[in-house]
Amino acid sequence: MRRTEYMQSQRFAIYARISRDRIGAGLGVERQQEDCTALVTQLGGTVVAAYSDNDISAYSGKHRPGYEALLRSIEAGEVDAVVVWHQDRLLRRTIDLENYIDICQPGNVATHTVKAGHFDLATPSGRAVAKTLAAWAAYEVETSTDRVKAAKLQAAKAGKSSGGNRAYGWNQDGMTLNEAEAPVVKEIVRRFIGGESWNKIALDLNARSIRTAKGNMWSAINVSNVAQLKRHYGIREHNGEEYEAAWNPLLGRDVYEDLQLAVKRGRAIYGKRSYSRTHLLTGFIFCGLCGNRMTIINAQQRDGSYSPAFNCRKKDHRGQTVGCGKVKRKKDPVESLVIECLIYRLDTPDLGAMLASDNSDESLKKLIREQESQNLRLQEILNLFSTGELTFDEYRTAKATAQARLDALVHELDQKLSRNTIGLIPAGQSVQKAWDAADIEWRRDLVDALIEGVYIYPKQKGDGKARYKQWIFNPDRVEIRWKA
Ligand SMILES: [Zn+2]
């Protein structure tokens, strides 16, 4: 029966597969199937089934539904022979081959390839050839991963573009500037260094119908990411290492340093407190009795009206005890007092001394650079530990030392950046004038630059007779703790 069929026409199954590997690269499933069908015709057979898997590497051992179906039809005796474009399409691991041979042997199913000829898996020599080819295929996959890595590193060292998604401001080649977008990158960077927030810039770009590289609206994160793309500054990054780019930079390294400074400054000022900014002193007021950070409530006055007040809450919204609940003070006189003290302080010679301290951008940049290299040092210590070059004890000691140095740097940087904010007062303008003209953000920056915290103490006997401006209020119950 079987023999008759064989004489009439051998039944062939075709197997095609697309993967990203080199052999047969660019050959789609269709093209592979055409070549295979031509071979079947040449051999005088009939194609009874065609199986394919798409874009899956045979080497990875992932599930291949087409391949599994092929094996099942061989086992079921539905095919007499298999044709593939290259045996790589079928098997890449020797273990696959062993399995394949086991399945083909009972029915004496032959395997033909368009590229590598015919394997008679029924004979020892045929199997040996197939095994050798499979072994070489595996070897090529293993070394090609190394080769790809090496090629990428080489490209990075040469400063060549890494390809991939188009970066905003650049053409797809990664080497030439996009004439419409490059000026936008410059604008974003200039405006952020000039003190505008990422969010404000994003809103403005959207309002002007300017879109991202992918054609979307801007968010603060998009804007920040685009500004900080190292490629603008002629830096090619690869695996955390930096190389000199082969393309002409859009902006200079000095601009990059200015931007880094502005980013850190933003972090130092805005990063620490994320409270609502509707009130000048939110987040700065503490209970003098228990140290709890006070919140603002609407407190009823003697005349029945309501006005905002700082309050020490006993419990937070989750019902957990956070404070003593014993101190409350009207907001307006506290605010007025703090502003008065702040402006007085800025007008004293103390400030002159503060401003005279080494506060230049240059010294800040030096600190930032040192902080970055200390960060790298920490990373290196971790690497040395993970590769076994440091024992755990050595790692712990080295890490503690590096971390302490980093913490000290961050503290120093924070202080300098805070003081730097005072430089925000325009030259020739009185502090009071600058204050009156400024918006809430600027005022809060100033408060943050100078004040550690404002502590409010419980009222004492006789405070009911104390007056401060139009209020019944004793300024002695307020303590301002200055930063510098
Ligand atoms: Zn309290």
Image (cartoon, helix red, strand yellow):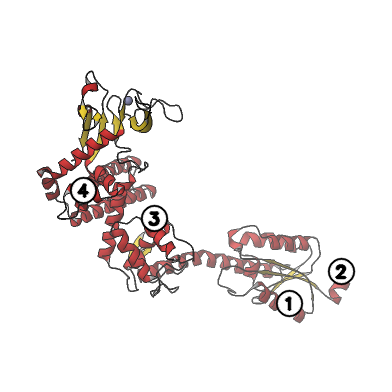
Residue 109 relative to residue 287: left or right:
right
The residue singled out by tag 3 in the image is 199
Image coords of residue 293 (percent x, y): 33, 32
In front of the other: 49 or 312: 312
* Between 468 and 393, the one nearer to me in the picture: 468
| Disc 4 crowd, CA 10 A, few/some/many (<14, 14-19, 20+) | many
Location of residue 311 (image quadrant): top left
Are circles 3 and 1 on residues that touch, CB within 8 Å? no
Q: On screen, 332 above or below 194?
A: above
Q: Earlier in the sequence, mark 3 or mark 1?
A: 1
User: Would you say the beta carbon of the disc 2 residue lies within 8 angstroms of ligand 1?
Assistant: no
Q: Is mark 3 on a helix, strand or loop?
A: helix
Please provide percent x and percent y for residue 245. 34, 70
Secondary structure category for the residue under label 2: helix
Residue carrying label 4: 416
- Height in image: 239 above or below 475? below
Any part of residue 323 in sight: yes
Cβ atoms at labels 2 and 3 below 8 Å apart: no
Amino acid at circle 1? Thr
**Residue at 58%, 73% in the rendered image:** 23
Question: Hey, what amino acid is under mark 4?
Answer: Lys
Residue hosting label 2: 2
| Quadrant position of ligand 1 | top left
Q: Is mark 1 on a helix, strand or loop?
A: helix
Toward the viewer: 209 or 74?
209
Residue furthest bottom as drawn:
42
- Alpha-carbon distance for marks 1 and 4? 75 Å
Q: Measured along the vertical axis of the image, is residue 395 above or below residue 290?
A: below
Q: Nearer the viewer, mark 2 or mark 3?
A: 3
Residue designated by label 1: 37
**Percent x, y of residue 210:** 43, 66
